[in-house]
Amino acid sequence: MPPPQETAEEKGFVEICVVKKTRVRADYRACDDAEPGYSWYFLAMDARVPATGSKAKKGSFKKPAGGWYRAPAKGGLASDVRTEDVEDRVEVCVSQRTRIRVSDIRCDDDEKGYAWYYIRIDGYVPAVGKKGEEGSFRAPYSDAYRARRKGGDAVEAAIDYEDPDAPEEEEEEEEYCTTTINDECVETNRCTETVNSICTKTEDGPLGSFSNRCRNVFANKRWTQRC
């Protein structure tokens, strides 16, 4: 029995940015920033993606169903050159005309003239009152995090974002008593004596004659008295 064929939805599509009147391919930045006169154009996986500066054919201005991809400036067969952008984003509310960042509440309330602008997690987030750069008005398929008002490096400005590449912080072991004599702690899980900079197990009490100033030290596989 032959394997089932992929549907158009499973294959997805490649999106490019074009001059709306001519369908000549332009840099993605023009569409990401919603510049007037430019539009997204969608190509099937068996279509040929034009190089930047060339005219797009056999596509659609209407976004189809399925996952989306982008393509390098040189173009080529869509299924061969598609690239997937799955980086997390930070979302900030900006003026659609100027990309100046404003309070998130304007986008939460769907105020006219304002929209979410999505910046990659490895980018830079503007503070409120500053202009957003190198982001996109295109909603991502990946996660998007709100940002602190002061902005900064996206990975640090993102609220509740956990960087998967950040080194794990080592938890300091809590000290607790392991041995008591007459209800007094005489030994803990921490090192209490060192010999030649090596942590050794210790125990109060005499080896031979008793002295309050002496400690029993376990080193070199044997107990010795240290006074």
Image: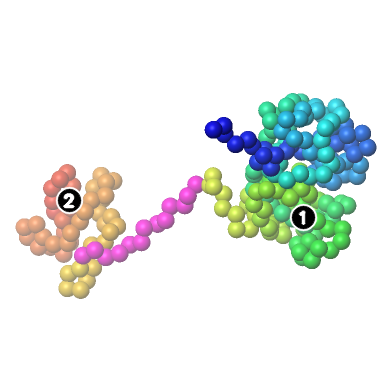
Q: Amino acid at mark 2?
A: Phe
> How many badges with numbers are in the image?
2
Q: Is residue 227 visible?
A: no
- Give 19 or 102, whichever is nearer the viewer: 19
- Disc 1 residue type? Trp
Find out whether residue 88 is within the magenta segment.
no
Question: Could you say whether the residue bearing mark 1 is in a helix, strand or loop?
Answer: strand
Q: Quick check: 142 above or below 15?
A: below
Of residue 77 and residue 129, the one placed in the foreground of this image is 77
Q: Give the extent of the magenta segment.
A: 167-179
Residue sitting nearer the eye, 138 or 15: 15
Residue under circle 2?
218
N-term-proximal mark, 2 vs 1: 1
Q: Is residue 148 left or right of residue 4?
A: right
- Which residue is farthest left? 208
Which residue is labeled 1 in the image? Answer: 116
Q: Position of residue 103 (x, y in %)?
A: 77, 62
